[in-house]
Amino acid sequence: MLKDMTVKTELIIAIGLLSVILIGIGMLGLNGIKQSNEELRTVYQDRTVTAVDQATINDIWEAVRKNVTIAASTKSTEFAKEKSEETAKTIKRAEEIWARFMVTELTTVEEQLAQEKLRLHAAYVAAVNKIFAMTIAGDFDGASKNLKDEAEPLFYRLHDTIYSMITLQGKVAAEKYESAVSDYSSIFMIMIVTISSSVLLACILGYILLRGIVKPLNEAITIANAVAAGDLSTRIEPRSTVNGYLAA
């Protein structure tokens, strides 16, 4: 069956096969680029931006601590009320930034730290509100005592938890980078093997096609020479190949 195929058919099959291989290589490359872009997006959006946001949150809590400390030590109810309103807005800003973080891709460790942060956040906000309520009511001694015994320990635990999350971002980003490098190396090797195999296949198909063209031509030349020499006994079998067209 293959022996009786025309050169046109053989060329169509060869070009079609090579085209499929080239399309496969192209799709593999595009998929690799897509994966690489996704890894880079994750490192930037879920790690770099998150680390900056969490550092901002820590700075906000420092501002909250400063406000409540000043309110307790100034011993002015009007000033305490002013700082209470300012602090409420500051805490709201921190909560808005935190909400953006919670919709990103979280690791198991991040989820655990996030739950601990939320617990400490609620406890510290409650302690801060209690202190402001005392200062506005004029109980500055009670506010100072509550600041030292309750609010300060909670602040440091909250601060340390957020700092741990910031540190974790660098570790996770490094893991993502290593994963991206590994994926790139795998895809690169697959493409090298596929391209090398395609070149080898092209050479084999080229040899087969060339042989399919040259061999019938040589047979036709041999028959023509025999006829020219007066040998009319040579039998020509018409076929749908190069030899058949020449014989016709």
Image (cartoon, rainbow, N blue to C red):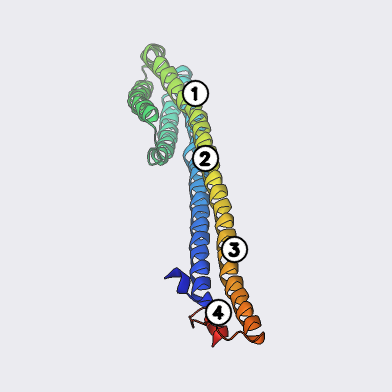
- Estimate how packed mark 1 is, as few (under 14), some (14 to 19) or many (20 or more) residues with alpha carbons within 10 Å: few
Q: Nearer the viewer, mark 4 or mark 2?
A: 4
Pointer 2 residue: 180
Q: Nearer the viewer, residue 27 or 49?
A: 27
Name the residue: 52% across, 37% down: 182
- Report whether residue 44 is seen: no
SS type, badge 3: helix
The residues bearing labels 3 and 1 have C-alpha atoms spaced at a distance of: 82 Å
Q: Nearer the viewer, mark 1 or mark 4?
A: 4
In this picture, is 239 found above or below 24? below
Q: Nearer the viewer, residue 17 or 92?
A: 17
- Report whether residue 183 is seen: yes
Q: Nearer the viewer, mark 3 or mark 1?
A: 3
Name the residue: 52% across, 42% down: 186
Q: Which quadrant of the figure contains the N terminus?
A: bottom left
- Estimate how packed mark 4 is, as few (under 14), some (14 to 19) or many (20 or more) residues with alpha carbons within 10 Å: many
SS type, badge 2: helix
Kind of residue sitting beneath label 2: Ala
Question: Which mark is on residue 243?
Answer: 4
Dot 3 or dot 1, earlier in sequence: 1
The residues bearing labels 3 and 2 have C-alpha atoms spaced at a distance of: 40 Å
Pointer 1 residue: 66
Pointer 3 residue: 207
In this picture, is 218 found above or below 36? below
Q: Nearer the viewer, mark 2 or mark 1?
A: 2
* 163 sits to left or right of 143: right
- Estimate how packed mark 2 is, as few (under 14), some (14 to 19) or many (20 or more) residues with alpha carbons within 10 Å: some
Estimate the x, y position of residue 105 in percent, counting from the top left.
Answer: 40, 39
The residues bearing labels 1 and 4 have C-alpha atoms spaced at a distance of: 97 Å
